[in-house]
Amino acid sequence: MSIITIKNLSYQYPISESDALKDVSVTIERGKLYALVGANGGGKTTLCNVIRGFIPHFYKGDLRGEVLIEGKDIREWGMGELSQKVGYVFQNPFTQISGVKDNVFEEIAFGLENLGMEPGLIREKVDQVIRMLEIDYLRDKNPFELSGGQKQRVALASIIVMEPDVLVIDEPTSQLDPKGTEEVFKIIELMKNKGKTIILVEHKIELIAEYADYIILLNEGEVAMQGSTREILTDERALTFGAALPQYSLFGMEMRRRGMDLGSIPLTEKEAIEAVKTWMKKGVNA
Amino acid sequence: MNNERSMLSRLYPTTKFMITIALCLAAFIVPGYGFSYAVLPICMVLAYFAGSFKEFSNLAIKALLMIVVFIFILQSFFYPGHDILWSWGIFSIKREGVEFALFLTSKIVAVASAFILFFRITKVKDLVHSLEQIGLPSKVTYVILSTLQLIPEMKKLTLVIMDAQKTRGVETEGKLLVRMKAFLPTLSPLILGSVASTEERVLTLESRAFSANVKKSSIYTLEKTKYDRLVQILLIVLLAILIVWRVAL
């Protein structure tokens, strides 16, 4: 069953001349991980803002077309209501701190406090999330004094604790080091296994190849391609729309071009090794 | 002082505020300036029991000494009067002026030290929490708290910007004029950056359901203890006695 349906969506920012999104139609299925890819300025963040309801509730501008979240139009959802339905984590770890809490535990609890949940229950839930994300050692620290990676994980925890069905995660790792990236992706995988619907904007295409179920490729505000991860990442046309391909599929394509077809185009390191092994065996036998 | 907080600092913020108000009122009820000046040592003793004697004394004396000295000089020389105590050329100290200065400074010392004491022994977090309990909107308390937390952050950011401008060849050290010239290239990115990050701060708050239309709860709790009651009653009784004594006088 689809949880989000977008039909013929166009959007223009208040002071801009042209549409940031042009005739976008996308269906998001429950429990799947969707990766939004494409060059900068392609409309990825704008689409995230629409799904989270910041457009049209916070940014004005001209929104045309249909955006249904669980069958209800985005314009009819209230901002407060939506926060329990769609969680939003974005790029900059430094501004995703409420700024009024002096320890991580209360920082994570902030969202639930705003929902007026009973304090005992809040403590229980925050404890749970802290244990799940393995950030217990940060518990009593001041959120302002964390590193970028730690802040990003606290930001994720603060959203996850509110238990939204959909997580919109906009370039969570672009300001992080490899270790921070790995830890953030561990959390994303954990959420996927919990059955959350995830919409992820990310440039690290190798990670997308590993985690995403579907890919939506945006180019200049239009959906250039969409389909399963394998379908998109083994298609050379993706390159012309400003997307990157994993080095393993580029390798597979290059081999094919030189007349050394591997049989399939690999996506991940594991698949590439497999494919090369079988290909070499074939070569020996022939 | 940290975990084992003293009894005084464990009082509820409103009770602490009542102490401050009581001290101020008392300073105005009791005639003369002796008692008003005595409020400062009283506050020092209270600060000692709250475990912040040194900070309080430092701050209070530094802040008040300048004001008191200036008022004394200005009032004793320029207050209109006839009873000249000492004169030098066209300047003369008048008795009326000295009396007025004593009156004025004693009240200032009393009120100021009572308030400094309050802010020394009350954590902002506690104060804001109790204000919220009274019914102040959470938007207002958010502004108070976030401003206080952002000031040290802005300081750090200023240093980063100054370093960045230095690498671009802006001189930030040296004579006064050089420093003044560096002011604009340092401040404008700071202010513009803060404005820009406001947008993301709003998104953060919205993501955390800040504008949800329900009554917010809080996992941070402050308990009113029996001591609060005791102190409040004590204060009211003392004030009543003072008033009766003053009227009977």
Image (cartoon, coloured by chain):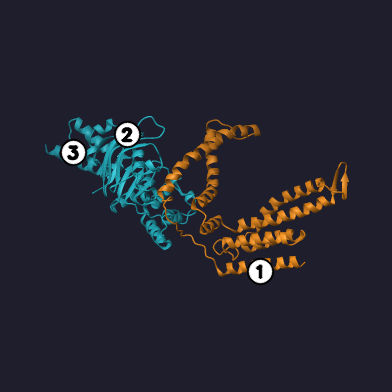
Q: Chain of mark 2?
A: A
Residue drawn where x is 37% and y is 48% of the image: A78
Coordinates of residue A237 in the picture (x, y in percent): 24, 32
Question: Alpha carbon of mark 3 to alpha carbon of mark 1: how far?
Answer: 90 Å
**In the picture provided, is B59 more to the left or to the right than A126?**
right
Question: Alpha carbon of mark 2 to alpha carbon of mark 3: how far?
Answer: 32 Å
Residue under numbered circle 2: A221
Q: Are marks 3 and 1 on the same chain?
A: no
Residue drawn where x is 36% and y is 38% of the image: A46
Q: Earlier in the sequence, mark 2 or mark 3?
A: 2
Disc number lying in front (1 or 2): 1
Q: Amino acid at mark 3?
A: Ser
Quarter residue A242 falls in: top left
Residue lying farthest to the left in this orientation: A286
Q: Is residue A17 above or below residue A180?
A: above
Residue under numbered circle 3: A264
| Mark 2 Cα-neighbour bin, 10 Å: few <14, some 14–19, many ≥20 | many
Disc number lying in front (3 or 1): 1
**In the picture provided, is A14 more to the left or to the right than A230?**
right
Name chain B's colour: orange
Please name whichever residue, A277 or B234, is drawn nearer the observer in this view of the structure: B234
Q: Chain of mark 1?
A: B
Q: Chain of mark 3?
A: A
Coordinates of residue B116 in the picture (x, y in percent): 64, 55
Pointer 2 and pointer 3: residues touching (CB < 8 Å)? no
Q: Amino acid at mark 2?
A: Gly
The local secondary structure at tag 3 comes to loop
Name chain A's colour: cyan
Q: Is residue A51 above or below residue B95?
A: above
Residue drawn where x is 22% and y is 39% of the image: A231
Residue under numbered circle 1: B237
Check residue B111 in the rendering and tell me which mark sits there, or answer none.
none
